[in-house]
Amino acid sequence: MNVTIRTYTPADAEACRLIWNRVVEDGVAFPQEEGLAPAEADAFFSAQTHTGVAVDDETGRILGLYILHPNNVGRCGHIANASYAVDASARGLHIGEKLVLDCLAQAPAYGFRILQFNAVVASNVHAIHLYERLGFTRLGVVPGGFRLPSGTYEDIILFYHGV
């Protein structure tokens, strides 16, 4: 399968919304508790500094996406944050890696010098392995920083990477 990462367009809104909402509903990676409504999706994805979309070149099917935006403002506005979502049926196909690499490549064009992740859930071992393999530095752990759907709390890990 050949996959291209391209810039989001409004025509991608529904496919991206469904992928995004599945991650939100799973409740083990994103902090959001409510998914995007159909009427909200385009505005949300368009409002990001950059939204990248992973597309199967053969079928045109969207396999995943990422959003890139400032992690902070003013004197810390050069630090970016990103979130990644891969369609459940495409997990294990290295789509996440392609999304992260594209995100690292895109970030400097928007003036970002650092990509920081504030809340990688400790049980998200695939993401942690990927980030470490791609050279992200582990900043530390926030004990009990993420509330799971069961009501229990799990540690979150902070990472950063220069871009």
Image: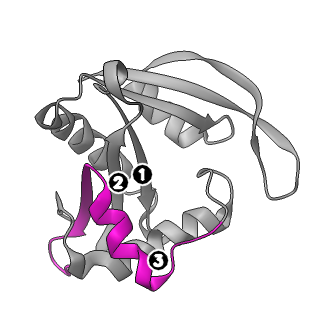
Q: Secondary structure at mark 2?
A: strand
Measure the C-alpha gap from mark 2 to mark 3.
Answer: 13 Å
Instruction: Report the front residue among 103 and 55.
Output: 103
> Disc 1 designates what residue?
84
Question: Callout 1: 10 Å neighbours few (<14), some, many (20+)?
Answer: many
State which quarter of the image contains the C terminus: top left
Secondary structure category for the residue under label 3: helix
Residue 54's label in the rendered image is none
Tell me if I can see residue 70 in this picture.
yes
Which residue range is magenta in the image? 34-61
Disc on the earlier residue, 2 or 3 = 3
Q: Position of residue 74 (x, y in %)?
A: 33, 25
Q: Secondary structure at mark 1?
A: strand
* Marks 2,3: beta carbons within 8 A: no
Residue 156 or residue 96, whichever sits in front: 156
Q: Residue at x 46, y 60 (%)?
A: 91
- Give the crowd class for mark 2: few <14, some 14-19, many >=20 residues within 10 Å: many
The quarter of the rendered structure image containing the N terminus is: bottom left
**Distance between the Cα atoms at labels 1 and 2?**
4 Å
Image mark for residue 18: 3
Is 120 rendered above or below residue 151?
above
Q: Amino acid at mark 3?
A: Leu
**Residue 1 included in the magenta stretch of the image:** no
Badge 3: few (under 14), some or many (20 or more) residues near its Cα, within 10 Å?
some
Residue 66: give its label.
2
Q: Give amino acid for label 1.
A: Tyr
**In terms of sequence position, does the residue under pointer 1 or pointer 3 come before the other?**
3
